[in-house]
Image (cartoon, grey):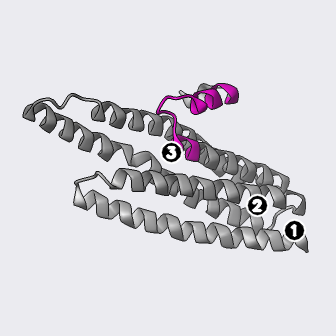
Amino acid sequence: MIRHESIEDYLTRLASGEPTPGGGATGALAVAEGVGLICMAARFSEREDLAAEGEKVIGACLRLSDADERGFAAVADAYGLPQDTPEQKEHRSAAVQDALAEAVRPPWDIVDAVAAALDLAERVLADANPHVLSDVGTALGCARAGLTAAVVTLLTDLSPLKDETLADELRAEIDRADRLTERADAMLARVRESIAG
């Protein structure tokens, strides 16, 4: 599992020619790193309560990185099923749709994790130690990267998806991610202003 790998081992796998891990898993890890910085900033600002909340988000993101890798692998396996006969084509199509319906869950949940991360960052920034503002700013960049990963992954899964109800839900989640990106950008602009004095 990704969460138990060394950073070097993970990056070696990421750079390989294998289809997993990919963008979704990487996005989840980016959010986890960002929340780690928020936890550090919280502790330097004497907000252990916020750091404890952040540690739960980190754990969720690590689980999401593993879930995304499994989900994408299942989609790849489904696309690799034989389709030489009408029955095989029908089975393959159903398997692809089933796998896609599961694969959208981790990137969907990344958006939730980023929402939690931004809430934590906002609360830390309300009374932050000025020496950790750059760390919070970096955390916001990580959160934004996670949102980008979630959106492009959801868009990729959305294209072949035939379940229109689920597709509509994904479109709504993509819109939500775009709004969260705007929020992260606005927060980062405020951090930059504070650092610049």
Secondary structure under the numbered disc 1 in the rendered image = helix
The residue where tag 1 is placed is 195
Q: Position of residue 68 (x, y in %)?
A: 46, 40
Between 83 and 186, the one lying in front of the other is 83
Gap in angstroms between the C-alphas marked 2 and 1: 10 Å
The residue where tag 3 is placed is 24
* Dominant secondary structure (helix, strand or loop) of the stretch shown in magenta: helix
x 46%, y 50%: residue:
107
- Magenta region, residue range: 7-28
Q: Position of residue 180 (x, y in %)?
A: 56, 67
Task: Name the amino acid, label 2.
Answer: Gly
The residue where tag 2 is placed is 137
Question: Is 73 drawn above or below residue 40 in the view shown?
Answer: above
Of marks 2 and 1, which one's residue comes earlier in the chain?
2
Between 60 and 13, the one lying in front of the other is 13
x 10%, y 30%: residue:
85
